[in-house]
Image (cartoon, grey):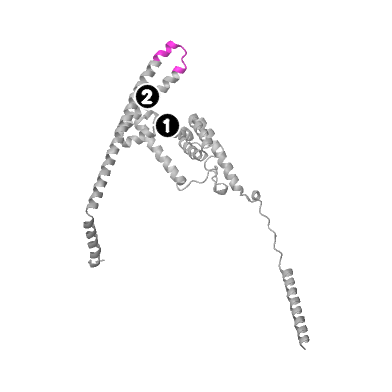
Amino acid sequence: MRMAAKIILLSLSVFLLAVCSLQAKESETAAPPIPQVSPPDEAAVAPPAEKERFIHGEEYLTGLLEKIKKADPNEGARLEKLRGEDPQLFRKEIRKVAQEHGIAPAGFEAGQPRGEAGMEGDGRPPMGMMGREKVREHIQARENLLTAWLEKNEPAKAKELAALKEKDPQAYMRRMAFEMKKYREIIDTEQTNPALAEVLKKDLALKQKQNELLEKLKGITDEKQKEEPTKQLKEIIGQRFDLIVQEKQLKYEELKKQLQELQQSVNKSQSELENIKSKKAEHIDKRLQELLSQSEKLNWD
């Protein structure tokens, strides 16, 4: 009897094991195979917009540099050197210089539609918080300021620029950028130190005469004929020296005045600090009374 029971139990165990094995095989057959995913090809998925952004940016900067070299060779040479030494600073400086000269490279004129990846039609990244309208307003304000100053101090040049504006607006903007760079320090200084601005104005006029004499001397081969222009040049250099000394003296006096005002502020702050520290108990009692009396005040609101 016991033997029969054992045989039955053993048979039942084998039967159950076979059923479980069969179910496992059916599950494996029904389940879809897991696909083998190979790593993506980085070259295939690289966004083309990034390549376009780089290509357009370099084309734009190269075009700017070539035009700046023609308009201002010294500035162009400086920027070309900076491009190799510090590319990040170069990108910042070249746009600043181009804006001052009113320059845009061929094939990248303003007004083209916005390109891919958020790029402007001229290859530049979109302008930041300032926006195009703010830039135009800033340029217009500078133009108005320079025009008013020239009408007062250089009327012949102001008349010449007005005629150029009617004849060739683009050439006018480039010329205005050049003149602003030339007169900007004088115009700004007039607001804070008129005496210094007058010295700067005289020195600029002498510098122009100096350059004219140098050009004249380059065309003279006879040593005898060089004597008079050389004498005039020496006189101008002497006058410029006196103006440079005067300029440095005025700047020294202005700096000295600023230091005196700063020292007065320091002395005042120190006196206030000492007064507060010496009356600590008094200030504490006063503040305590203010806090305690707030609850007793009648609210009329």
- Residue 225 included in the magenta stretch of the image: yes
Residue 208 circle label: none
**Segment tinted magenta in the rendering:** 217-228
Local SS, label 2: helix
Q: Residue furthest bottom?
A: 1
Horizontal and vertical percent position of residue 106: 55, 36
> Within 10 angstroms of label 2, few (less than 14), some, or many (20 or more) residues?
some
Horizontal placement of 25 versus 263: left or right?
right
Horizontal and vertical percent position of residue 49: 59, 48
Looking at this view, is 5 or 272 the one in front?
5
In this rendering, is residue 32 above or below 87?
below
Horizontal and vertical percent position of residue 210: 40, 22
Looking at this view, is 265 or 15 the one in front?
15
Looking at this view, is 5 or 118 the one in front?
5
Q: Amino acid at mark 2?
A: Leu
Local SS, label 1: helix
Q: Quadrant of the N terminus?
A: bottom right
In the rendered image, which residue does mark 1 sit on? 161
In the rendered image, which residue does mark 2 sit on? 206
Q: Main secondary structure of the magenta part?
A: helix
In this rendering, is residue 66 above or below 34?
above
Horizontal placement of 258 versus 179: left or right?
left
> Within 10 angstroms of label 1, few (less than 14), some, or many (20 or more) residues?
many
